[in-house]
Amino acid sequence: MTTTTVRKRAATGSLLGLALGDALGFPTEFNDVPSIVAKCGPWREMELPTPAIVTDDTQMTLALGKGLRTAMDRGLLAPKRLERPVREEFVDWYQSPENNRAPGRTCLVACNLLKDEGRSWQDASQIGSKGCGANMRVAPIGLVPGLSDEQRAGAAQLQSALTHGHPTALAASDLTAHAVRLLAQGVEPAGLVDLLRAYAHANRTRYHDRWLGDLWTRSQDPTPEHFIARGWDECLGVLDRLQEAVRAVSPETDPCLATGDGWIAEEALATALLCFLWFVDEPLTALRRAACTAGDSDSIACLAGAFAGAWLGADAWPTEWADRIEYRGDLLTLGALWDA
């Protein structure tokens, strides 16, 4: 890890940004932009709600983060070592009385199936779902230090596959974790989309058999390579739209019009990145733009916050916001562990 990464506290910044975006977007989800402006005022002046309550996006990010911490405490990160504690954390979240924040149907169905310890996780995975629930929680995989490229990609796809088994959910989760990692390491945002496109092309037919096992056989695809390529191709398509939008679309327009509403994994990634790339050095403006959208506002804003915090570090967020975010203690504990 570079001294720059340590100094800026990228993990703390990313986790706080994710939760702040989530809380900012919670009251605006399911509203169109005129309704949001009528309720919250001009989008550039949106304020963090009081209390700053988060959604299942932050809850599941913490579940993944805690499972990842347990797995790495036990030794070198490997598929079974990751799957067991993350599965347990997801089931604990599913059964928690705090799981009352309008969670996605895919997560509920899959986590209910994961309760059965005798069932393989591949049989619980919802192979037809590419909802953004897979990649809105994946930031910890991009923040934890010491992983190889193969471990990071495999872990990002496995955590997605526990609930969302569609190849686009897998690819978008991998790509989201990779974007967080690059920004935490100090890669210039101006070159980020090109790097993500190159990564997608390089991995287009790479099926992580060690991490995913026979998941692909639940699909109609003739080979594992065909299966995973479908996901990467959809991600490449939305990255093309993103590249054009960064250059040509006004930030005063709803970003969902350019890169999608964000209910599905590849669009959540692209629309969140668009908000971040429009306002690279104005993290609160990026969050506000992401929260004032017609689509899945909390997930778009939580990802925009994860990207901005990874790039700028913990000092990106004003104390008066960061001090009152729900689950602040849990977020800071994981951030400090991975920034150490």
Image (cartoon, rainbow, N blue to C red):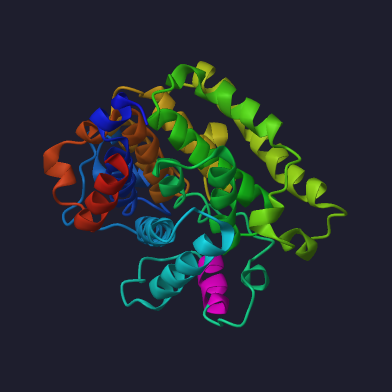
**Can you say which quadrant of the picture contains the N terminus?**
top left
Please name the predominant secondary structure of the magenta segment in the image: helix
Residue at 39 percent of width and 35 percent of height: 307
- Percent coordinates x, y for residue 152 in the rendering: 53, 44
The image quadrant that residue 26 belongs to is bottom left
Magenta-tinted stretch: 105-114
**Farthest front residue in view:** 75
- Percent coordinates x, y for residue 323 in the rendering: 13, 48
The image quadrant that residue 158 belongs to is bottom right
Q: In the depicted view, which residue is nearer to us: 170 or 144?
A: 144
Q: In the depicted view, which residue is nearer to us: 59 or 278?
A: 59
Give left or right: position of 233 versus 1: right
Q: Taking 97 as reference, is 232 above or below it?
A: above
Residue at 28 percent of width and 48 percent of height: 337
**Can you say which quadrant of the picture contains the C terminus?**
top left
**Farthest left residue in view:** 320
Q: In the depicted view, which residue is nearer to us: 41 or 12?
A: 12
Residue 292 seen: no
Residue at 38 percent of width and 57 percent of height: 69
Q: Is residue 111 rendered magenta in the image?
A: yes
- Percent coordinates x, y for residue 223 in the rendering: 85, 52
